[in-house]
Image: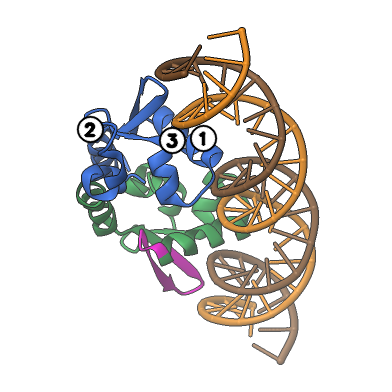
Chain colours: A blue, B green, C brown, D orange
Amino acid sequence: MLEWLKEPEINFPGQLEHAGFEHGVCVGQIQAKAGLTQSTVSEYLSILQRAGFVEAKRVGQWTYYKRNEGAFEALSKLIQSNL
Amino acid sequence: MLEWLKEPEINFPGQLEHAGFEHGVCVGQIQAKAGLTQSTVSEYLSILQRAGFVEAKRVGQWTYYKRNEGAFEALSKLIQSNL
DNA sequence: TCCATATATCGGGAAAAGTCGATATATTTG
DNA sequence: CAAATATATCGACTTTTCCCGATATATGGA
């Protein structure tokens, strides 16, 4: 999922109709591609959010998730320096 | 354990007597510090070895483990570029 | 060779993570 | 407000991971 969210335009073409990608990708799109149930994907995304790897933004009935690049940068640096 | 192995001299003073640190730290020393059973620590180290994060060297009845810094560098870069 | 020491492997039980269906909450529309 | 749609939460079940004791293997010394 995290890799998918690097290139939303390529990986989630179905979203073009009702919204752009400025806020990220909505749960339903991710769920369809993942092939898991809605509840599983929703929970997974909320875990990624709590961990800081994605940011969530509610817009109307949809919740959009996008990557937080800073978190990956920080993790990369952490492995370099602390681990 | 991986952090401990960054500074063997500081974290495993008990090993000074019978060997230096040129090959790393032996399983018994790590086990004592970890507070887990011998079998658990042995298995854990072998997993880390298969994953490439440590290197093992058998010297007599002892097996010494030391960090493979290249693996951490590679993981850090992987997170930066691919993830 | 026999014993002591160090490490590795095996089998199983406990803990954690993954996944689901059912249901609750939130939002939009008629 | 009622229905439809999107997402979140809950409880249970399955799978995986963690960790142990028991045992096997390897090495060195009497």
At 44% from the left edge and 44% from the top edge, which residue is drawn? A31
**Amino acid at the residue labelled 2:** Gly
Q: For the residue carrying disc 2, how many other residues have a C-alpha within 10 Å: few (<14), some (14-19), or many (20+)?
A: few
At 42% from the left edge and 67% from the top edge, which residue is drawn? B50
Residue B62 inside the magenta-drawn segment: yes
Of residues B62 and D22, the one drawn nearer to the viewer in this rendering: D22
**Amino acid at the residue labelled 1:** Glu
Q: Which residues are magenta?
A: B51-64
Q: Is residue B71 above or below residue A14?
A: below
Of residues A75 and D7, the one drawn nearer to the viewer in this rendering: D7
Residue B10 inside the magenta-drawn segment: no
Which label belongs to residue A43?
1
- Residue B53 image offset from top left, x and y in percent: 36, 58
Q: Quadrant of residue B70?
A: bottom left
Nearer the observer, disc 3 or disc 2? Answer: 2
Q: Is residue C29 above or below residue B58?
A: above
Of residues A13 and C1, the one drawn nearer to the viewer in this rendering: A13
Q: Of the residues under marks 2 and 1, which one precedes in the sequence?
A: 2
- Which residue carries the number 2 mark? A20
Is mark 1 in CB contact (under 8 Å) with mark 3? yes
**Amino acid at the residue labelled 3:** Leu
Which label belongs to residue A45?
3
The secondary structure that most of the magenta stretch takes on is strand
User: In screen coordinates, is D20 left or right of A52?
Assistant: right
- Residue D12 image offset from top left, x and y in percent: 77, 40
Q: For the residue carrying disc 1, how many other residues have a C-alpha within 10 Å: few (<14), some (14-19), or many (20+)?
A: few
Nearer the observer, disc 2 or disc 1? Answer: 2
Q: Of the residues under marks 3 and 2, which one precedes in the sequence?
A: 2
